[in-house]
Image (tube, rainbow, N blue to C red):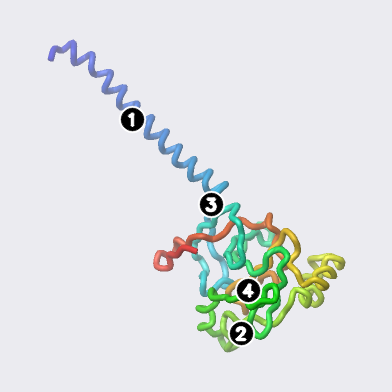
Amino acid sequence: MSENNKRRQAPKKEESGWQFWLQTIALTIAIYAVFFLGFKFILSNDKVSGPSMQPTFENNDKVIATRHSSISRGDVIVLKAPDEPGSFYIKRVIGLPGDTVVSKNNKIYVNGKLYKEDFLNAGKKVKEPDTSLYAGKPYSYTYNFTLSTLAKNSPEWQQRYSSSYLKKIEQTNKVPAGTYFVMGDHRTVSKDSRIIGFINKKSVIGEVKWRYWPLNRWAIF
């Protein structure tokens, strides 16, 4: 090959190198954009804080939730804490809008029917320590209540809601429209709807679908 031909080909190699790096940078930006938009509008990456969902979820578990899910009874959701601005809770949906909810003899009844809570089976095997208010009781132990009695007797509810709102709940024993009644699986310690009241649909961040950390507790929900 002549010296002149070599000189003609050199710029093409240089141009090809620039194209490679430009394509790599563009691809990297595109991947980051997809992840950013995905976690902003479709997914939510969250960390569990506290014991309220034990033993289903432990403190510092990391989970992925899907936004804009159709919420069903029994789903685990991430929600904006109504009593702590800027904080988030992870709870399980027990009552849907229009449901009646009754806890009696450590069993939950929804719309007059026994609600099977298989997700509490693991918690039934773990007992509270002697120093606990519920010493010797399993994590799953649920004290008696109805929505009506909570509306009538709960100091937290009386601070949160108007008297007319509470009166309606007392009369109907129903979850109000546009809200959910949520509870933690660690029933003896969970600060849930029994205390913080109903959760507005707009406060739901997403439905938990995947625990990816720790790796030895990896699970799909």
Q: Quadrant of residue 176?
A: bottom right
Say if mark 1 contacts mark 4, CB within 8 Å: no
Tell me the kind of residue under disc 2: Ser
**Element type at mark 3:** strand
148 or 21, which is in the foreground? 148
Tell me the kind of residue under disc 3: Leu
**Element type at mark 4:** loop
* Disc 1/disc 3 C-alpha distance (Å): 32 Å
Residue drawn at x 57%, y 59% is: 207
Q: Earlier in the sequence, mark 2 or mark 1?
A: 1
Disc ID at residue 43 = 3
Tell me the kind of residue under disc 4: Ser
Question: Which residue is farthest right?
Answer: 164
Is the residue 144 above or below the residue 184 in the image? below
The residue tagged 2 is: 132
Is the residue 172 above or below the residue 12 in the image? below
The image shows residue 26 at horizontal and vertical percentages of: 42, 33
The residue tagged 1 is: 20
Q: Is residue 104 left or right of residue 62?
A: right
Q: Quadrant of residue 114?
A: bottom right
The image shows residue 162 at horizontal and vertical percentages of: 84, 65
Nearer the observer: mark 1 or 3; the answer is 3
Residue drawn at x 31%, y 22% is: 15
Tell me the kind of residue under disc 1: Phe
Q: Is residue 29 left or right of residue 117?
A: left
* Residue 83 visible to the viewer: no
Q: Earlier in the sequence, mark 1 or mark 4?
A: 1
